[in-house]
Image: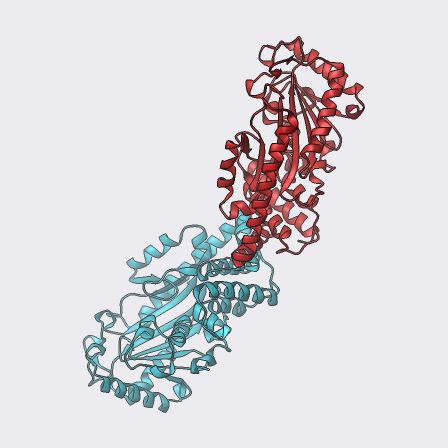
Chain colours: A cyan, B red
Amino acid sequence: MSKVDVFLDHTAEWLRGGDADSNIVVSSRIRLARNIEGYPFIQRLKDDDRKEIIRLVSEALQKISQTRDLYYLQKADMSDLDLLFLVERHLISREHAAEQAEKAVAISPNEVMSMMVLEEDHLRIQAFQSGFQLMETWRIINQIDAELQKRMQFSFDPVLGYLTACPTNVGTGMRASCMLHLPSLVLTKQVHKVLQALSKLNLAARGLYGEGTQATGNFFQISNQMTLGQPEEEMIDNLVSVIRQIIEHEKEAQVYLKEQKQQKFLDQVWRALGTLKSARIISSVEAMQLLSLTQLGIQTGVIQSQISRQDLFALFLLIQPAHLQKLAGKPLSSAERDLYRADLVRERLRKLSL
Amino acid sequence: MSKVDVFLDHTAEWLRGGDADSNIVVSSRIRLARNIEGYPFIQRLKDDDRKEIIRLVSEALQKISQTRDLYYLQKADMSDLDLLFLVERHLISREHAAEQAEKAVAISPNEVMSMMVLEEDHLRIQAFQSGFQLMETWRIINQIDAELQKRMQFSFDPVLGYLTACPTNVGTGMRASCMLHLPSLVLTKQVHKVLQALSKLNLAARGLYGEGTQATGNFFQISNQMTLGQPEEEMIDNLVSVIRQIIEHEKEAQVYLKEQKQQKFLDQVWRALGTLKSARIISSVEAMQLLSLTQLGIQTGVIQSQISRQDLFALFLLIQPAHLQKLAGKPLSSAERDLYRADLVRERLRKLSL
């Protein structure tokens, strides 16, 4: 059994749901890029420096009450499958997974925090919350950052701010983002218009797994593009107010679908659920899309169900390749996964009386 | 209520099923083209002649014990919807439905016989049987033809045989056909190869509603192309032996799908049923295709069901546009039909515990 398997059997904090709009804003995330003073940036970092940085971060985290109980995973602890599993849970980035040199990650048991050591920067501090909780997420991460700074010196320039390996992160080193589920804007073909407007506001829209990934399952990650020139709270305020507007657009599109396109909407939603309950072979892309429509059906009351938000959103996670293989307890080829995924979805939906 | 509505509530003989292969050879049909001596062919027929022919045929049919109880429908008895309804039941041709001049049709209560008066020829005698029963169909129609000839003189040339309005029917005036349901040959992409070979054997393959229609729902009508140069029994023997081979091809394709493509096959079949049970909008083409796959699933034992062959094949008929409007008791637009069809299919499948 792998060390990371502990996360398979419990539910990530960000899946929990909570606030009224947590079907639309699924989760909030903030990461801070930090580098330790006195060491070169990652490109010129020697192997010994890498080990030293891992040790320094680990020691510092263990001295802070909020991060004392983090699971600490080093490169040797994680197989390729483990790494993919952590990517699927958004606990590490694809880049961190691909890194071949020494690296580490420290994750809190409830997955509220994840510290990537030796990703693009020496340290990437991440905090997650369920639903639309950017300010709370900021409060959590800011506190950890402050505690860490009592114990170690981060590279900082009085004019520029925090220094980072890539100039796009200089300043606050912060990327705040929300994961939005926007099936109605996709169905009404408005999503591109809405997302295109973001770049003018210095915001970026990405797919489910960040930069360069596709928007599968109608999930979109909205984040600040600029890290410089504004205090963190202002950046977050800006992001919050834009996301509030997107929530309203999605809600309006929901009403439009329900009222103006009623029969077509019912048809799309029920066919999606019908296919999930029937298919014997299903790809992750198709399953995500159909789960997204099923979720929209439940959210809008078209499909009557007592299923919890957590149980349904957990399915989006469980059907991913590494999660499937962890559940199966063995490696599965792509074709085998499509069979196993279909079985899993049918089984879960039956258990959830859907 | 229209006179034709009597057929809505009872089941056509050819739906009944019976022999082992009646899932593949759904029905057998033979029609004879006959013209009454002393009258010109239809192209030059005057209105008075038309009325006279209708009278002559009607009187003759009423004197024959086997045709005494036919429903006799004249042009004035049938709305456009009625005509389409009869086309959907294969009781009249599209050409006969479109005919604007005086015309008539006489149909037996169990739909074993249908006499089109003033279609392309003065009289088109038709007999239907369920399953693969071409010889029995021939026996029935030959007897009626003989009885009619005791009472009226058909245009006949000692060398050419029966004379017909179109030279392609001269000789026997016979077209024998079977309706084949070949989903496995379609799924395995072999159907075109199989059907292409038919033309070399002087046989033709057509869609569900005859000449120029599409093969919806994986139904194909196989018939003799030539009407001249052979006695009827030889033509039928030829057709029977070719259809026997097609049955074997379809069965081999079924085994291949079940054994070699098992998971893909299960997926296709269950998705088809799942969609039928979920859709709120469905076109007749899609419904036919999905019913075809569902039928194949039941036939191969993939879907366990006690549903009768008759109940399932009846659905193929009930979802057609005129049948839907008869069931609804009102005219329905194309969009309304797609809704009503989806409701009907879900309702019926639920009642049939599918």
**Along the line of sight, the residue nearer the viewer: A136 or A214:** A214
Q: Residue at x 59, y 27 (%)?
A: B94
Q: Residue at x 47, y 75 (%)?
A: A12
Where residue B142 sits, quadrant-wise, is: top right
Tell me: A274 left or right of A72.
Answer: right
Residue A147 image offset from top left, x and y in percent: 33, 86
Tell me: A44 left or right of B191.
Answer: left
Where residue B165 sits, quadrant-wise, is: top right
Residue A192 image offset from top left, x and y in percent: 36, 53
**Along the line of sight, the residue nearer the viewer: B174 or A192:** B174
A252 vs B50: above or below: below
Residue B303 image offset from top left, x and y in percent: 63, 55
B169 vs A73: above or below: above
- The N terminus of chain B appears in which quarter of the rendering? top right
Tell me: B190 left or right of A172.
Answer: right
- Marker count (numbered): 0
Judge whether residue A124 can be spotted in this image: yes
Residue B139 image offset from top left, x and y in percent: 72, 29
A173 vs A68: above or below: above
**Along the line of sight, the residue nearer the viewer: A44 or A172:** A44
